[in-house]
Image: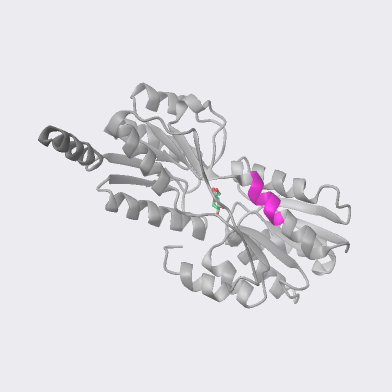
Amino acid sequence: GTAAALMISTTAAMAEGETVGFAQIGSESGWRAAETTLTKQQAEERGIDLRFSDAQQKQENQIAAIRSFVAQGVDAILLAPVVATGWDSVLEEAQEAEIPVVLLDRQVDSSDDLYLTAVGSDLVHEGEVAGEWLVNAVGDEECRIVELQGTTGSTPAIDRKTGFENAIEGHDNLEIVRSQTGDFTRAQGKEVMESFLQAENGGKDICALYAHNDDMAVGAIQAIKEAGLAPGDDILIVSIDAVPDIFKAMADGEANATVELTPNMAGPAFDALEAYWADGTMPEKFIQTESKLYTQENDPMGEYETRKDLGY
Ligand code: GZL
């Protein structure tokens, strides 16, 4: 009857007008920029007032942003935690203020009592998919691999390394000979790849690059070309994110494989928050997004066209 209808409309209205603080890491990669774009679009569509903070990849800035959101009395906080450790006290402050926290795309070492849910991919699996592709690509050939790691101490850097090493274990012809962080950026990916090339006989001793994200791979591709070698051919390139520019590189034969990470973490996050705000529904502690392998055989230019306007 009318009362029930009124209740439903009131509940729906409750999702309207909520205020959410988003403590974003920064804009270190195309993927990160797309996540921000999609989060703002989702908030707009749902009538959520989004307060945004870019921490320039500094944990202390994220912690300050969370404290500011708590002081403002927001209805929820989104956090993409730049590293896994050091969050207990600020998450306890949010909990004391009864403000739910949802983690996006990375995890924290804190107890899962300190956040409502975490939305992200299986980061170990992503590394395994990347490693399995390379195992299949090289067969029995000797393959000296260099690795560009993500941000030191972040769960993607830790887990993607673990997954890749799981996949190549037992294949003695594959060996990671150099591994260093490029902090998920193109610039540092290029810089570190230049040092790898110099250290490995001008790159002639390198068979493959495994980069924890496409942006570092794109930077490395530039370095490989400047060293006079053919990326995607002399040096195989496998990375993660599936940003538009890696598909353009694949179309040019300069990259070989990427593992897709959806930038739409906010959709599942806001769904969980709206259910929680409506009637206290408690979500699963981990809401997992899917990852899919793309190679040069998967119409890279078509994939580029599909993604190029999504805010990367
Ligand atoms: C992974 C995410 C990573 C992306 C990078 O879940 O945290 O951070 O793979 C980004 O592009 O910098």
Taking the image as shown, residue 201 lies to the left or right of residue 291, namely right
Please determine whether, in this image, residue 71 is positioned above or below residue 187.
Answer: above
Residue at x 42% of width, y 64% of height: 310
Residue at x 69% of width, y 56% of height: 130
Residue at x 30% of width, y 46% of height: 50
Residue at x 84% of width, y 61% of height: 143
Taking the image as shown, residue 312 lies to the left or right of residue 178, namely left
Start-end of magenta stretch: 124-130
In this view, the residue farthest toward the front is 1
Measuring from the top left, give residue 219's x and y in whole percent: 62, 65
Measuring from the top left, give residue 163's x and y in whole percent: 70, 46
Residue 231 among those drawn in magenta: no
Q: Which quadrant of the structure image shows residue 116?
A: top left
The majority secondary structure of the magenta stretch comes to helix
Please determine whether, in this image, residue 101 is positioned above or below residue 234.
Answer: above
| Count of number-bearing discs | 0
Q: Is residue 43 visible?
A: yes
Measuring from the top left, give residue 262's x and y in whole percent: 50, 54
Taking the image as shown, residue 149 lies to the left or right of residue 165, namely left
Please determine whether, in this image, residue 88 is positioned above or below residue 82.
Answer: above
